[in-house]
C-alpha cells in the first residue's frame, strides 16, 4: 500500500463494471492459461511453464503458487468484516516503488519453496482452482459497499476486488511473457488496470499505447522504444510504477 494523497480517492472517476465479475473473469482466464502451459495438467511441462515470467525472478510454477496465496488472501479478506471507515481504496491499496522486485524478499523465497513442494504443475493448477473457486464465490456474495480488513487497513469489498483485478491482470501478463501465441487478460481487466495505473501516476498514459503496452511500460515489465519514450514525454522519467 502507498500513501497516495487522500484527494485522489475523490478525484478519480468511478470504475466501470462490477468488480466481482471482473475478478471472476480474471481468475477464469488465468486457470485457462495454466491449463495450456501445463499441457493438459498431468503430462510433463515444457520450458514455457518454467520461463513464463516477465517481472519477477520466479519460475512460472512459483508465480502460480503466488496466485494461490493471493486467492487465499482474497477468501480471508472477504470474510473479515470491518466497522471502521475505509483507510484505502483501489488506488491507495498499493505500495508503489520505482524498483522492480529482486526475488530476495522472504515471501518470494517462501513461495519458491512452496511451489517446489507441489512437485507437479497440475497440482498447482488444481489448488488454484479449488481455493480460487471459494474466493470467487465469496466475491459473488460480497456487498461491494461492505467494509473489509486486510493488512491492518480497511477498504470496501468492491475496492478490494478491483485491486485484485489489477493483480490478476498483471500476473497474467507475466505468465505469457514468453508465450506470444497465448491470449492475454480479459479486455475489461486490462482497462481497469490501466485506469488504476493512471490514477497512481496522476496523469493519463498516451492514448497511442494499447492497454497491454501501457501496463508493460508503466509497471517496468519492459523498456520503452525510442518512439514510445517520445510519446511518453516527461512521464518516461518517472517510470516504472512498481505495484506491491
Image (spheres, rainbow, N blue to C red):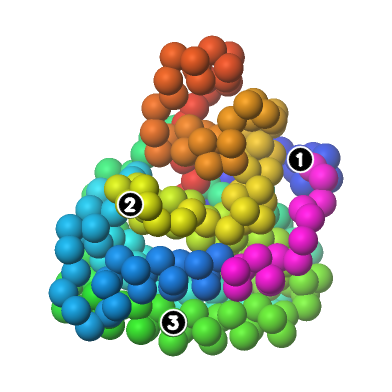
Q: Mark 3 highlights which residue?
A: 129
* Residue for point 17% across, 63% down: 46
The image shows residue 121 at horizontal and vertical percentages of 24, 75
Q: Is residue 14 magenta?
A: yes
- Disc 3 and disc 1 in contact, CB within 8 angstroms: no
Residue 222 vs 212, above or below: the answer is above
- Residue 169 placed where, x, y %? 52, 56
Which residue is disc 1 drawn over?
Answer: 8
Secondary structure of the residue carrying tag 2 is loop
Quadrant position of residue 86:
bottom right
Identify the magenta region. 12-25
Q: Report whether 62 appears left or right of 69.
A: left
Q: Quadrant of residue 113?
A: bottom left
Which mark is nearer the camera, 1 or 2?
2
Q: N-terminal of the two: label 1 or label 2?
A: 1
Q: Nearer the viewer, mark 3 or mark 1?
A: 3
Give how far apart the Cα atoms at labels 3 and 1 are: 35 Å
Q: Which residue is mark 2?
A: 179
Of 236 and 81, nearer the camera is: 236
The answer to whether residue 98 is seen in the rendering is yes
Q: Is residue 207 left or right of residue 212?
A: right
> Reading the chain from its start, which is encountered first: label 3 or label 1?
1
Instruction: Give SS at disc 1.
Output: helix
Q: Residue at x 66, y 56 (%)?
A: 188
Q: Which numbered disc, 3 or 2, marks the residue that appears first in the sequence?
A: 3
**220 over 18 or under it: above or below:** above
Disc 3 secondary structure class = helix
Amino acid at each position: 500500500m502507498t500513501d497516495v494523497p487522500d484527494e485522489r480517492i475523490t478525484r478519480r472517476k468511478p470504475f466501470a463494471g462490477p468488480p466481482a465479475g471482473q475478478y471472476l473473469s480474471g481468475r477464469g482466464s488465468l486457470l485457462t492459461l495454466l491449463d495450456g502451459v501445463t499441457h493438459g495438467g498431468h503430462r510433463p511441462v515444457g520450458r514455457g511453464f518454467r520461463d513464463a515470467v516477465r517481472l519477477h525472478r520466479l519460475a512460472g510454477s512459483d508465480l502460480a503458487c503466488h496466485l494461490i496465496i493471493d486467492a487465499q488472501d482474497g477468501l480471508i479478506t472477504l470474510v473479515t468484516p470491518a466497522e471502521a471507515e475505509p483507510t484505502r481504496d483501489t488506488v491507495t491499496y498499493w505500495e508503489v516503488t520505482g524498483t522492480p522486485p529482486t526475488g530476495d524478499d522472504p515471501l518470494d523465497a517462501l513461495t519458491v519453496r512452496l511451489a517446489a513442494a507441489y512437485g507437479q504443475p497440475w497440482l498447482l493448477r488444481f489448488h488454484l482452482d479449488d481455493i480460487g473457486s471459494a474466493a470467487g464465490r465469496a466475491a459473488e456474495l460480497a456487498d461491494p459497499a461492505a467494509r473489509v480488513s486486510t493488512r491492518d487497513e480497511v477498504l470496501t469489498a468492491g475496492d478490494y476486488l478491483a485491486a485484485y483485478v489489477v493483480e490478476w491482470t498483471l500476473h497474467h501478463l507475466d505468465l505469457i511473457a514468453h508465450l506470444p501465441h497465448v491470449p492475454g487478460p480479459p479486455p475489461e481487466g486490462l482497462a481497469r488496470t490501466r485506469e488504476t495505473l493512471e490514477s497512481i501516476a496522476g496523469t493519463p498514459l498516451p492514448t497511442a499505447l494499447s492497454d497491454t503496452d501501457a501496463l508493460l511500460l508503466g509497471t517496468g515489465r519492459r523498456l520503452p522504444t525510442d518512439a514510445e519514450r517520445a510519446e511518453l514525454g516527461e512521464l518516461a522519467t518517472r517510470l516504472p510504477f512498481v505495484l506491491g
